[in-house]
Amino acid sequence: MNIGDKLYGNDKMALDKLDLNDNYGKITNFQFEDDDFYEHLNNPEHDNYYNIQMFLSCLSLCHTVYTQFDIGKLIFNSSSPDEMALINAARKFGYIFRERRVNNEVILEINGKQKVYTILDIIEYTLER
């Protein structure tokens, strides 16, 4: 993936899917490894830090996924496996989509802290989008 002026992703990633979990359950539909990405994500002094934060925010906000809780596990529901992959990528890096409210508010948990966003418009997912 390309964020800012940096290309991330390891060409030698294992073909097997990673077995990932967080506090809400299993993270599916996701495979990515890059030491530089992790370093830049966690270093506020890095030139690409802000771009990565904005990229992960967009992944967490720009979709039509909805959630429900079941016995302490966060269940994601989507009509598109592509949208699930985006949600799970952000989730792996600490940007967790928690809830979509009726008043167009979206709750994200970013590195353990909740943040509320107001969605101004939704463009429904299609293959052409």
Image (cartoon, rainbow, N blue to C red):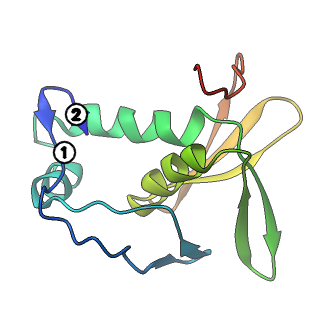
What residue is drawn where x is 34% and y is 39%? 53
Q: Amino acid at mark 1?
A: Pro
Tell me the residue at 23%/50% (across/down). Answer: 41
Above or below residue 23? Residue 119 is above
| Quarter of the image where one finds residue 49 | top left
Residue 120 in percent (x, y) is at 70, 17
Q: Secondary structure at mark 1?
A: loop
Point out residue 100 in the picture as x, y percentages from the top left corner: 77, 43
Residue 114 seen in the figure = no
State the quadrant of the C terminus.
top right
Judged left or right of residue 83, residue 112 is: left
Residue 93 pos. (x, y %)? 38, 58
The tag on residue 108 is none
| Mark 2 residue crowding within 10 angstroms, few (<14) / some (14–19) / many (20+) | few
State whether residue 2 appears in this view: yes
Position of residue 79 relative to residue 12, above or below, is above
In this figure, which residue is indicated by the disc labeled 1? Answer: 44
Q: Which residue is disc 2 drawn over?
A: 2
Residue reaching furthest right? 102
In the rendered structure, the answer to whether residue 82 lies left or right of residue 56 reads: right
Callout 2: SS = strand
Identify which residue is drawn at 28% across, 39% down.
Answer: 52
Residue 22 falls left or right of residue 16: right
Q: Where residue 88 sits: x, y (%)?
A: 51, 57
Q: Hey, which quadrant is residue 12 in on the image? A: bottom left
**Left or right of 55, for residue 128:** right
Q: Residues within 10 Å of mark 1 (few under 14, many from 20)?
A: few
